[in-house]
Structure formats: C-alpha cells, structure tokens
C-alpha cells in the first residue's frame, strides 16, 4: 500500500462504521463514486487501471473537499477494443445505468446533498451513458445534486487522455508505481513505435503483431517522472475545481 493510501483509508466508505460515515458526511454531505473498466492496456499495465486511477484521484480530491469515497466500480462499457485479451466489459447500457441509479437513489434516500460520478474510463459509449444520466437526473429535481466528470475532460490539463499510452501510464505510475512495468514492453531503441503517418490511434495498434498492440496514444516508453507528476497534480486540481464549481 502506498503512503497516500494509508493516509486516506479513513475516506473509504466501505471501511467505515455507520457513526464514522455520519460524522464525515455531517462535515460535507458529498460522496464520490469512481468508475473504471477492465481492459487490456498493453503488457506493462494492469487491466483495472481506469478504476484504480479514478479511485486514487477521488480519494486525493476528497482529502481537500471533504465527503467520502465509494469503492470503485471496475465494470465499464465496452468499446472498439472489446475483443482484446482480458477485456471484460458490460455490453448493455441499461446494465450499468441501473447500477448507477440504484446507488444514487440510495444516497439520495440518506439525504446526501452531492454525488460525483468520476470516470477514469472514457470510451465513447461510457461517456454517452454518463451524459444521458446527467440530463435525466437534472430533469427529475432530486435533492441530491449530481456531477458526472471524466478524467479525459478536466480543466488545466495539457496532455490528452489515451489508452495504456503515455497519459494512463503516467497517472498510474504516480499513484501505484509498483503496478507499472515498462520493461515488459519491447526495447524502444530496437523496436520503435511503428505508426503510419504518425497516427498513434490507428487500426494498426489493434494488430497483435504491432509493437504497441492494444495501446492507443503516445508511446508509453517516453514516460518521464516529472511530466507524470505535473500531469497528476493538474488532474487533481481539475477534479477539485469542478467538484467545487
Ligand atoms: Zn484505461
């Protein structure tokens, strides 16, 4: 366990007894719900990366804003890479939507004032589902205010989101350095990225023979700790800013 995980364990709702939950929420009536997906991210990263980064950022944001954090939901919507190895996603929108709604309705029953659905997985279908949920929730005039946020859409963040590439590798390396194994990828000098027309998102990356198979975006072997630290700090700042907006 990382130092920050030990320090923030008291913000994880699943570890708390009722009186502890009530005391924390009396100070700030807000619950974060981190979302992810189980997906192949290349040989160097774990399949649960999206939920791990979402959980970590929610906990660190919660430290600043108050409130509590739900356990991360590792299931997300499948996308264009649904057939890749060890990608285990939900196929139907209604399956996930009902889980989100059941959770939000229960939090609303308890009188929670604000909920933050924060996704570390920003596949097209997942994002569409969250937008739909936000619209429907806003229209039903619940006393619980909902904010649907994505790691790919935070203010003040220069690097674009990706899949198993430089962005995701950098954020996970900051939060869980022991989960990133860049040495499991082929040597960069001997096997440089092979991207026709410099397109790092093309269909060739879905070819198991490609040196960066299943990785969409800039070569993760260009990882730099300083850049990763700046990125993660910017993401955290962005979450807090949107939550408090
Ligand atoms: Zn991911």
Image (spheres, rainbow, N blue to C red):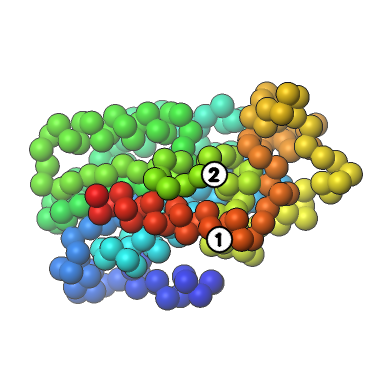
* Mark closest to the chain's N terminus, 2 or 1: 2
Left or right: residue 94 versus residue 200 is left
Left or right: residue 201 versus residue 4 is right
Where residue 244 appears, x then y in whole percent? 25, 54
**What residue is drawn where x is 71% and y is 49%?**
222
Q: How many labels does the image show?
A: 2
Residue in the foreground of this view, choosing between 41 and 241:
241
Where residue 86 appears, x then y in whole percent? 62, 41
Q: What element carries label 1?
A: helix
**What residue is drawn where x is 68% and y is 23%?**
203
Residue in the foreground of this view, choosing between 95 and 117:
117
Where residue 42 appears, x then y in whole percent? 68, 43
Q: Residue furthest right?
A: 190
Tag on residue 229?
1
Label 2, on which residue? 159
Quadrant in which residue 27 is drawn: bottom left
For the question of whether residue 52 can be seen, the reply is: no
Q: What element carries label 2?
A: loop
Is the distance from the Cβ of mark 1 to the nearest ligand 1 atom less than 8 Å?
Answer: no
Disc 2 packing (10 Å; few <14; some 14–19; many ≥20): few
Where residue 43 appears, x then y in whole percent? 71, 47
Left or right: residue 125 versus residue 108 is right
């Amino acid at each position: 366990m990382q130092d920050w995980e030990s320090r923030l364990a008291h913000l994880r709702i699943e570890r708390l007894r009722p009186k502890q939950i009530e005391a924390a929420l009396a100070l700030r009536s807000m619950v974060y719900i981190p979302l992810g997906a189980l997906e192949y991210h290349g040989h160097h990263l774990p399949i649960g990366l999206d939920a791990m980064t979402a959980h970590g950022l929610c906990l660190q944001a919660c430290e600043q804003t108050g409130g509590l954090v739900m356990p991360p939901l590792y299931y997300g919507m499948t996308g264009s890479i649904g057939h890749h190895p060890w990608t285990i996603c939900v196929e139907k929108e209604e399956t996930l939507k009902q889980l989100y709604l059941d959770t939000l309705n229960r939090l609303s029953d308890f009188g929670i004032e604000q909920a933050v659905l924060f996704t570390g997985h920003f596949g097209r279908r997942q994002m569409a589902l969250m937008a739909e949920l936000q619209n429907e929730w806003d229209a039903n005039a619940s006393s619980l205010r909902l904010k649907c946020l994505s790691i790919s859409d935070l203010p003040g963040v220069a690097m674009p989101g990706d899949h198993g590439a430089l962005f995701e590798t950098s954020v996970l390396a900051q939060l869980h350095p022991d989960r990133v194994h860049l040495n499991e990828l082929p040597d960069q000098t001997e096997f440089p990225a092979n991207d026709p027309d410099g397109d790092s998102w093309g269909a060739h990356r879905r070819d198991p023979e490609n040196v960066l198979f299943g990785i969409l975006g800039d070569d993760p072997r260009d990882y730099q700790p300083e850049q990763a630290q700046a990125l993660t700090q910017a993401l955290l700042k962005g979450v807090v800013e949107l939550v408090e907006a």
